[in-house]
């Protein structure tokens, strides 16, 4: 069936620009599936590392548009002057490709197709793949559910894979339909027998057509229930979108699974089913461990946490948040715990088994889960604890030092300290000015810099002395540090134990006994606050004090303050703090307050009339009373850096006003980023053409623009003409201009009309500059980008030496009051 007749039959309006070449969606049986056959492989051409600009000569050629299909014996020059050679590799008996060269190397195939058609690439083990030059998401952890529709042309088609861990499996299959579900990656709740349910689930929908698909709905029906219809955003051409849908109904009283039918339909034709499938939900008793789903504020996706309910009793239980290790599902983590009468156990997911190492969006997931669980469960908010194993042990250190007033105690088990100590994030003690900017942008993961934040909460460290995965030296270093300043900590080194020694290495009785004896202090009872943060945008508040702005972005900021409620006074010292808020809700309104900061007396500060907050700002090195932060300034809700744009309900807006190549790039890059966020973060980020985007709508929602001022019609309304203005052929940054058609740029700015939303831009001065952004690891934990980065093609061959300019905007979001480095 030709695509045009399919759409006419379903009555789904095209309505949007088709950016890719049109072709027929041909049905194909297995005998016509083109084989991959012999591969050409290339050992890594550069050392892998978690860096913002990975050095990769192959990626540099692809970005420049000069890459050509290799032949056996061709060489690629490494940055160190040595060369790598393309070599032949036949598939193994199981059809996969395995070789040491594929530990970070490349695999190339030329695949013949008898005709133009759409096929589905089912591959695993790869970091990403270029299909005829189009970047598509990979499956580095070999989950097996990454199926992406690809456009094959009649004749030879080029597949260039980056391979992560030494093995690659790949095949092409015919799509079963133009639109279909992929139930291998569903996120669903568990239902409680005989209880009414109204909540969320998610499933990938694959659009195996060359056109946008609009006005679609997913209808769900529980047995005996009424159909529930959920409208979907537009689905881009040749895309995978993990769409949210609602489930409403009451399961029967059984411990068996219940089947739910899913129907994909056109909003204008609810009688015709485009695709259908069936999913199965567990039905459990109220006391059983179960999955609970929720809509994330980060991207609108559906996430879950696993709950081990407290044994019912007379006391209001506390809550223990537990973080899993690498490769472990949240539900698997929860299954390790026995129920307890005094605490619920809640396992967050990090959004995936590997996810973000509990940093970045993994950290945000843990906070969302904590908020959701506290909101829906009956919890004693003063009795909140945190624990985790392995990667989750690192997450415990990370969240503990970042949010010390959220937990009464933490218990890392087999945890590594930081991205710098264990996870391969390079760090220099004496970086140059440019490297310092990027190092600071990733400084939120520096556990040791924030370790004294743990002073006010209990710490229980657990580790096996024979751990061959996370060396016990990580725990011993923390023991040494805690011993130098901390008054409430315990340490247990399990003799003879390795990395995993059964459920007890997470559900350790002595650690839970330690937790049970500790509670958070009552509001207003804390008289001393010692707190440090890498950025207010990551963590700003501790008890009644909030660091709202820094003098120097992403340099460590700290406060040490004493509060005497009876004397109505605050006093202490600060470092790298430009703006401070003091919460006085616990005090009796009326008389003025006395504040002393860094030796400066602020006498008789008036009691606030409309809000129970006192603000002070530093001007010319001196503190003065102030009001609430002016609109358009940096605040904890919006202070950068660049990757901060990828949250807060983010939507991708692609340019359609450029050349055919520029328009095609915008769609492909946004689709690639959305796919990567789906894979790494179980996410769903809508992609919208600029012609369909309304800047006046949802003004508190983050937006990422793809294109520049000439190619993206939304640029003018969201970014105007400065202080960063990227157009064809040039970039204006502050009062300086850089010219050329091969410059790439990343930046984040405040969204006009909002006090919380940002606008990110992934852009270039021409197609060469735009393609420079294709492989940048936006979603890899431990990698940081400042507020704005301008770079040349040699950034892909020289790393940071190829950066033209980078920096942080000032607290007024200006260049002149910020910190920028030019080369």
Image (cartoon, grey):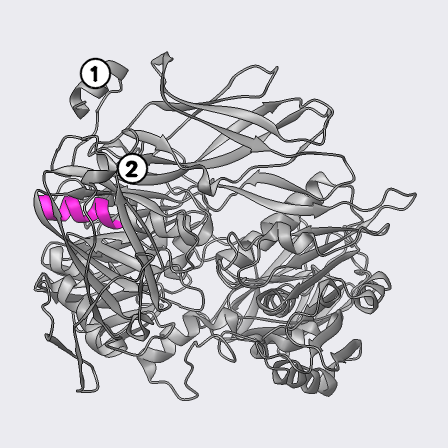
Would residue 315 be found to the left or right of residue 390 on screen? right
Q: Quadrant of the N terminus?
A: top left
Q: Residue 609: image x %, image y %?
A: 66, 47
Q: Is residue 260 magenta?
A: no
Magenta part of the chain: 659-669
Place residue 518 in its image quadrant.
Answer: bottom right
On screen, 580 above or below 202? below
Q: Secondary structure at mark 1?
A: helix
Q: Nearer the viewer, residue 758 or 156?
A: 156
Name the one closer to the observer, 690 or 638: 690
Residue displayed at 72% across by 87% down: 484
Out of 375 and 273, give the one closest to the viewer.
273
Observer able to see residue 459: yes
Q: Is residue 665 magenta?
A: yes
View extreme (top): residue: 271
Check disc 1 and report the residue beneath it: 8
Q: Is residue 641 left or right of residue 365?
A: left
Task: Indicate the position of residue 79 as horizontal and vertical percent values.
Answer: 20, 82
Q: How many marks?
A: 2
> What quarter of the picture does the C terminus occupy?
bottom left
Q: Kindly identify which numbered label has been placed on residue 688.
A: 2
Q: Which mark is residue 572?
A: none
């Amino acid at each position: 069936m030709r695509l045009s007749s399919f759409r006419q039959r379903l009555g789904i309006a095209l309505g949007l620009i088709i950016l890719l070449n049109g072709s027929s969606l041909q049905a194909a049986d297995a005998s016509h599936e083109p084989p991959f056959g012999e591969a050409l492989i290339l050992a890594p051409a550069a050392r892998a590392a978690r860096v913002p600009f990975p050095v990769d000569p192959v990626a540099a050629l692809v970005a420049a548009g000069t890459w050509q299909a290799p032949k056996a014996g061709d060489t690629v020059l490494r940055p160190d002057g040595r060369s790598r050679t393309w070599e032949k590799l036949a598939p193994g008996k199981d059809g996969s490709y395995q070789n040491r060269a594929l530990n970070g190397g490349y695999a190339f195939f030329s695949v013949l197709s008898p005709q133009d058609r759409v096929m589905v690439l089912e591959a695993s083990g790869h970091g990403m793949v270029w299909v005829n030059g189009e970047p598509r998401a990979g499956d580095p952890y070999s989950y097996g559910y990454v199926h992406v529709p690809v456009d094959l042309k009649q004749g030879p088609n080029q597949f260039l894979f980056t391979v992560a861990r030494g093995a690659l499996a790949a095949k092409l299959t015919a799509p079963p339909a133009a639109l279909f579900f992929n139930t291998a990656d569903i996120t669903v709740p568990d239902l409680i027998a005989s209880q009414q349910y109204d909540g969320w689930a998610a499933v990938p929908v694959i659009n195996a057509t060359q056109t946008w698909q609009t006005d679609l709905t997913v209808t769900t029906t529980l047995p005996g229930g009424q159909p529930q219809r959920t409208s979907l955003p537009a689905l881009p051409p040749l895309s995978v979108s993990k769409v949210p849908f609602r489930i409403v109904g009451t399961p029967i009283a059984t411990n068996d699974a219940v089947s739910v039918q899913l129907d994909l339909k056109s909003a204008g034709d609810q009688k015709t089913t485009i695709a259908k499938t069936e999913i199965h939900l567990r039905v459990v008793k109220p006391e059983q461990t179960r999955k609970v789903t929720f809509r994330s504020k980060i991207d609108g996706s559906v996430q879950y946490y696993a709950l081990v309910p407290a044994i019912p009793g007379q006391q209001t239980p506390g809550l223990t948040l537990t973080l899993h290790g690498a490769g472990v599902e949240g539900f698997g983590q929860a299954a390790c715990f026995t129920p307890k009468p005094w605490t619920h156990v809640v396992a967050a997911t990090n959004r995936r088994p590997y996810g973000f190492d509990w940093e970045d969006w993994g950290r945000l997931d843990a906070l969302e889960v904590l908020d959701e669980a506290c909101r829906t469960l009956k919890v004693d908010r003063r009795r909140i604890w945190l624990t985790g194993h392995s990667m989750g042990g690192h997450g415990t250190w990370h969240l503990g030092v970042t949010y010390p007033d959220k937990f009464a105690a933490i218990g890392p088990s087999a945890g590594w300290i930081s991205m710098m100590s264990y996870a391969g994030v390079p760090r220099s003690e004496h970086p140059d000015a440019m490297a310092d900017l990027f190092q600071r942008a990733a400084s939120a993961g520096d556990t040791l810099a924030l370790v004294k934040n743990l002073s006010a909460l209990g710490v229980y460290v657990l580790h096996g002395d024979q751990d061959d995965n996370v060396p016990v030296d990580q725990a011993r270093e923390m023991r040494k540090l805690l011993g130098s300043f901390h008054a409430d900590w315990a340490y247990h080194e399990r003799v003879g134990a390795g990395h995993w020694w059964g459920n007890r290495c997470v559900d350790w009785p002595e650690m839970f006994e330690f937790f049970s004896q500790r509670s958070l202090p009552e509001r207003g009872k804390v008289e001393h606050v010692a707190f440090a943060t890498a950025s207010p945008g990551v963590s700003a508040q501790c008890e009644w004090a909030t660091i709202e702005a820094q003098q120097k972005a992403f340099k460590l900021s700290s406060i040490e303050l004493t509060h005497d409620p009876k004397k109505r006074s605050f006093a202490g010292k600060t470092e790298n703090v430009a703006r401070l808020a003091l919460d006085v809700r616990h005090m009796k309104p009326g008389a003025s307050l006395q504040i002393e900061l860094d030796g400066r007396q602020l006498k008789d500060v008036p009691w606030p009339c409309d809000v129970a907050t006192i603000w002070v700002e530093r001007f010319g090195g001196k503190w003065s009373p102030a009001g609430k932060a002016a609109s358009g300034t940096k605040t904890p809700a919006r202070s950068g850096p660049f990757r901060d744009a990828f949250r807060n309900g983010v939507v991708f807006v692609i340019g359609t006003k450029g050349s055919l190549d520029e328009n095609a790039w915008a769609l492909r890059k946004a689709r690639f980023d959305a796919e990567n966020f789906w894979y790494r973060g179980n996410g769903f980020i809508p992609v919208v053409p600029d012609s369909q985007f309304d800047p006046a709508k949802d003004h508190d929602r983050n937006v990422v623009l793809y294109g520049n001022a000439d190619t993206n019609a939304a640029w003018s309304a969201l970014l105007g003409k400065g202080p960063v203005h990227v157009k064809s052929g040039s970039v204006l940054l502050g009062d300086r201009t850089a010219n050329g058609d091969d410059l790439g740029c990343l930046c984040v700015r405040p969204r006009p009309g909002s006090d919380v939303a940002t606008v990110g831009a992934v852009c270039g001065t021409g197609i060469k500059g735009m393609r420079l952004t294709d492989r940048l690891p936006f979603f890899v934990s431990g990698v940081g980008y400042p507020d704005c980065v301008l770079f040349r093609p040699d950034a892909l061959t020289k790393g940071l030496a190829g950066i033209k300019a980078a920096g942080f905007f000032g607290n007024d979001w200006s260049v002149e009051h910020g910190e920028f480095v030019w080369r």
